[in-house]
Amino acid sequence: MAVVQDAYEKHGLGRTTNPDSYFLSFPDLPRSRIIALPARVETPDSTDLAGIKWIGSFPQNVEHGIPRASAVLVLNDMTTGYPFALLEASGISAARTAASAAVTARAVATTLPPDGRLGVIGAGVIARAVVDYLLAVDYGCTTVLVHDPDPDSATHLVRHASAAGVAARTASLREVLDCQTVVTATTALEPYIDRGPEAGQLYLNISLRDFVPQALAGAQNVLDDVDHCLKANTSPHLLEQLLGHRGFVTGTIPELLAGKLCLSPDRGVVVSPFGLGLLDLAVGHWVYTHAEAGGGALPVPDFFGDLRRW
Ligand SMILES: NC(=O)c1ccc[n+]([C@@H]2O[C@H](COP(=O)([O-])OP(=O)(O)OC[C@H]3O[C@@H](n4cnc5c(N)ncnc54)[C@H](O)[C@@H]3O)[C@@H](O)[C@H]2O)c1
């Protein structure tokens, strides 16, 4: 979480490079995609780092009992440009997404205090990680309500949260949306939720496409990066198209974490993180340095073959 917070701070100060993600889609597999997220960031230990996450999303994997997402992360040295590490990155991606949710929720909590009720819509790998991180930061969850049309997934998350010591059960969509803090982590491609947060509520819109755009219009909207998030038919992007302007954007996660964004307790908050590749790099570098130090990195001698130009 400290690494993620540091990366957001640098992004807010303009000290990162994070171009648009590239979406590779397939006409014959409309639900599947593989996304490239290149970036450059300086890590907390002052390493100047570039790299790319290459993450596949094949939702049908779940029917075969394997996770939807799979990913690799390449870390490049900024002196030579050479890649120096290749990491499994679906775990890194889930961790940075959940860490982002936890640091953001913690920052919002100073204005909108949690009341203990956490609602989760979509009970997969990301939802599990977010629940774990919110519990780890003592966000104040005492009850977790879970909604997922797939009963197996819902039951698994209920058991997971119960094992962590909170009261958990499945619930209707309406009941979950009434919780003080609500997380969406579904694979829905079309919006189906027609209400936004009331005053005092925080919606963490991680899956980005669940809300009809009008539902966000009355909320305070916090995005990780405005240009990134207003793309790819996210709910905020649909709202921008509907209104013809960006006036509904209240601010960004980096502004919130830097104390430059004052939220009001009088309106609900929707946080929509598009997901920045620079977070994957920063967390991936943390994993790499710990693996190196602990003997867990696997060297590949002679990977580049001949390193003499002549
Ligand atoms: N914003 C970010 O930075 C970020 C990062 C990582 C993942 N994500 C997104 O998070 C989402 C979840 O990822 P995952 O790996 O946990 O997927 P997953 O397939 O493991 O779980 C998704 C769950 O959502 C459920 N679901 C589908 N439609 C639903 C609906 N209408 N209502 C309720 N539940 C529904 C499915 O049954 C499934 O159990 C994906 O959309 C992914 O793109 C966002």
Image (spheres, rainbow, N blue to C red):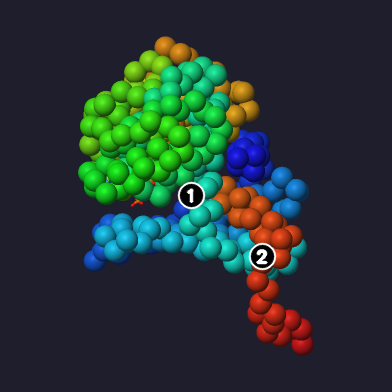
- At label 2, the amino acid type is Gly
Residue 76 seen from this side:
no
Q: Position of residue 95 (x, y in %)?
A: 52, 48
Marks 2, 1: nearer the viewer: 2
Q: Position of residue 207 (x, y in %)?
A: 37, 42
Q: Residue at x 67, y 60 (%)?
A: 291
Residue 306: quadrant of the picture: bottom right
Label 1 lies in ligand 1 vicinity (Cβ under 8 Å) = yes
Q: Position of residue 19 (x, y in %)?
A: 53, 51
Q: Please tell me the numbered disc located at residue 239.
A: none
Earlier residue among tags 2 and 1 = 1
Answer few, some or many: residues within 10 Å of disc 2's Cα (few below 14, many 20 plus, some between 14 and 19): few
- Give left or right: position of 54 versus 244: right
Q: Please tell me the numbered disc located at residue 296.
A: 2
Q: Secondary structure at mark 1?
A: helix
Answer above or below: position of 78 versus 112.
Answer: below
Q: Residue furthest bottom?
A: 310
Q: Residue at x 62, y 37 (%)?
A: 5
Residue 175: quadrant of the picture: top left
Answer few, some or many: residues within 10 Å of disc 1's Cα (few below 14, many 20 plus, some between 14 and 19): some
Quarter of the image where the C terminus is located: bottom right
Label 2 lies in ligand 1 vicinity (Cβ under 8 Å) = no
Q: How much space separates mark 2 and mark 1, taking CA atoms?
A: 20 Å
Q: Residue at x 45, y 34 (%)?
A: 165
Residue 7: quadrant of the picture: top right
| Mark 1 lies on residue | 94
Quarter of the image where the N terminus is located: top right
- At label 1, the amino acid type is Ala
Q: Residue at x 39, y 25 (%)?
A: 117
Q: Position of residue 172 (x, y in %)?
A: 23, 32
Q: Nearer the viewer, residue 108 or 18?
A: 108
Q: Nearer the viewer, residue 261 or 106?
A: 106
